[in-house]
Image (spheres, grey):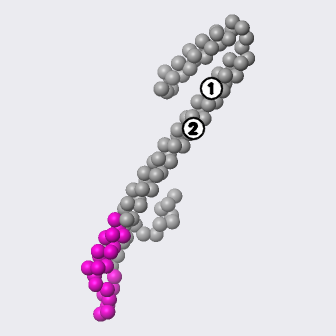
Amino acid sequence: MYHERILLTSKDILEKEFKIDTRGYRPQEVDKYLDVIIRDYEEFARIIKETEADKKEIIEDNIRLKQEIRRLRTQLDALKEGTGSSDSNNADLLRRISNLEKIIYGKE
């Protein structure tokens, strides 16, 4: 995603060779500055990687929570439709089904 927009890598910066002119910059200063830039690039890459991992985890949590909401709404609707003594039977059945789903799908 970001790789298409970034032109240089830290390796590109490190391996860049400049032509030396009689009135050019001091190579030591250029190298020192490029080292700082490389360090920043590497840190940016780490930050982006961490952010992408966090984003993926949040999306997975969101999907899981939406599924849980659907399941709970279905249970609630089923409980609302039941009447009298069958209410407790339905609630017991739904509790058992929920426990089985937790065992089968490894949910907490």
Determine whether, in the image, residue 79 is placed left or right of residue 54: right
Q: Residue at x 28, y 82 (%)?
A: 27
Residue 72: where, in percent of width, then height?
62, 26
Residue 51: where, in percent of width, then height?
46, 52
Q: CA distance from mark 1 to mark 2?
A: 14 Å
Q: Residue at x 69, y 8 (%)?
A: 86
Residue 79: where, in percent of width, then height?
68, 17
Foreground: disc 1 or disc 2: 1
Determine whether, in the image, residue 23 is placed left or right of residue 102: left
Question: Per the image, is 19 magenta?
Answer: yes
What label sits on residue 72 in the rendered view?
A: 1
Work out whether 45 lies above or below 87. below
| Element under disc 1 | helix
Work out whether 83 lies above or below 3. above
Residue type of the residue flagged with mark 1: Leu
Find the magenta span and give its range.
18-39
Work out whether 11 lies above or below 93. below
Residue type of the residue flagged with mark 2: Ile
| Element under disc 2 | helix
Badge 1, how many Cα within 10 Å: few under 14, some, many 20+? some
Residue 52: where, in percent of width, then height?
47, 51
For the image shown, how many numbered marks are present on the structure?
2
Q: Residue at x 69, y 6 (%)?
A: 85
Residue linked to disc 2: 63
Residue nearest the viewer, comparing 81 with 49: 81
Question: Per the image, is 28 magenta?
Answer: yes
